[in-house]
Image: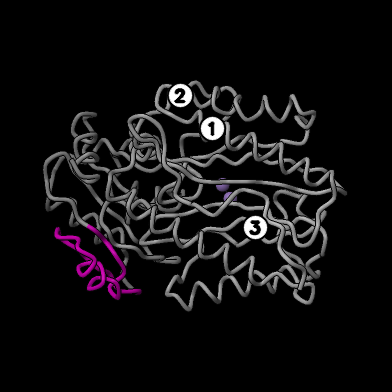
Amino acid sequence: MNHLQNLQKWVADSGYDVAYISNPTDIMYFTGFSSDPEERVLALFVFPEAEPFLFTPQLEVEAAKKAGWNHDVYGYLDHEDPFEIIASHIKERTQQTTKWAIEKADLPYQRYEAVKKEFPDAIFPGNASEFLDQLKLFKTPDEIELMKEAGKQADYAFQLGFDALSTSRTEQQVVAEIEYGLMKKGVMHTSFDTIVQSGVNAADPHGGPEKVNIQSNALTLFDLGTVNKGYMSDASRTVAFGEPTAKQKEIYDVCLQAQLAAMDAAKPGITAAQLDGVARKIITDAGYGEYFIHRLGHGIGTSTHEFPSIMEGNDMVLKPGMCFSIEPGIYIQGVAGVRIEDCIYLTENGNEPFTHTTKELQVLPIK
Ligand code: MN
Ligand code: MN
């Protein structure tokens, strides 16, 4: 069953009359059509039996058809009322329009009101957001291939970043070199803002690259990812630029041991909480537990953060086809920040990483 068939089955089995998918990423997931509609309306409507349809701004209708969607596409012009047109197409398909499923985590209240105006009897028992969270847990072989390619792009981006390190460049300029290099290869989108943090800046795990020069004889942290046909990569490496201090080396080594142990333990049957515990125990036993201030990992796919969440308290049993990050970090203010991250997919017996850049501490020559 493909993604759309799964959605139709859920709508039918749950007894809903109409499902309204509003999130552009989720529309891409079901239709293959990728678009950022800005303030205009982009929507997918699915029914238990009738043909689904895609609704787009008029200027996107042809692009949606070319993307491979082989059901109806309807457009609207800027001066028209989109929900009036949507309502007419729904009523062409079915007279049963009471029970709706919507993406409750996504649909703006204003659009909910627009639906209510056209369908005053509508009630909204279905939450397609929750359904999608579960459906997206498992990637198909085709999706994994797309993510492998995104992983290769991330590996290339690391090489660009390592090559660009220089005491005469700022963190922001190293980011620029990475993204320019990616674009020259036709990789036009990163999956989030590229992070390059040098020296003590890396101790702020949610900070960004600053207008400060790369420091020598210190660690530099890279966290980056790309988008390949809607599927994301996300990976981190920390390298030394010149000789690091003994303390920095020690922190790196503890983080690496934790990452490798979790990579080894990630296989079907372990729970998300147990896997987090494998890495956390190593860091805690080494005395750095209080500096590992986030979960071990997060799911990844059409977005950089989805289920499963690899953290304490999550007793979800991990299964083949799940894709997630393993990214322990140690952040000590005024000393250094280290994070080592691969995203992986679970196979029948173990896992495969999407990224392959070496994790042995690289000591790059100062330039
Ligand atoms: Mn991540
Ligand atoms: Mn990351």
Going by the image, does 42 lie left or right of 195? left
**Which residue is drawn at the image coordinates 45% and 42% (left, top)?**
344
Q: Position of residue 316 (x, y in %)?
A: 45, 24
Asked which secondary structure carries label 1, the reply is strand
> Is 76 displayed left or right of 91 in the figure?
right
Q: Is residue 328 visible?
A: yes
In the rendered image, residue 334, in percent from the top left (x then y), is placed at 88, 49
- Ligand 1 within 8 Å of the CB at mark 1: no
| Residue 83 in which image quadrant | bottom left
Residue 326 coordinates in the image, percent (x, y): 55, 39
Per the rendering, the mark at residue 316 is: 2
- The stretch in magenta equals 54-78
Q: Amino acid at mark 3?
A: Phe
Identified at 75% across, 75% down, the residue is: 169
139 with respect to 358 (left or right): left
The numbered mark, 2 or 1, whose residue comes first in the sequence reads 1
The span from disc 2 to disc 3 (Cα, nearest Å) is 30 Å
Q: Tell me, for residue 310, which label it has, or none.
A: 1
Side of 341 where 82 appears, left or right:
left
Residue 73 is one of the magenta-drawn residues: yes
Tell whether label 3 touches label 2 (CB within 8 Å): no
Amino acid under label 1?
Ile
Q: Mark 2 falls on what kind of element?
A: loop
- Residue linked to disc 3: 222
Q: Residues within 10 Å of mark 2 (few under 14, many from 20)?
A: some
Residue 272 within the magenta-colored segment of the rendering: no
- Tag in front: 2 or 3: 3
Q: Earlier in the sequence, mark 1 or mark 3?
A: 3
Q: Amino acid at mark 2?
A: Met
- Taking depth in this image into account, of 316 and 283 the one nearest to the observer is 283
Q: Quadrant of residue 128?
A: top left
Residue 62 coordinates in the image, percent (x, y): 22, 73
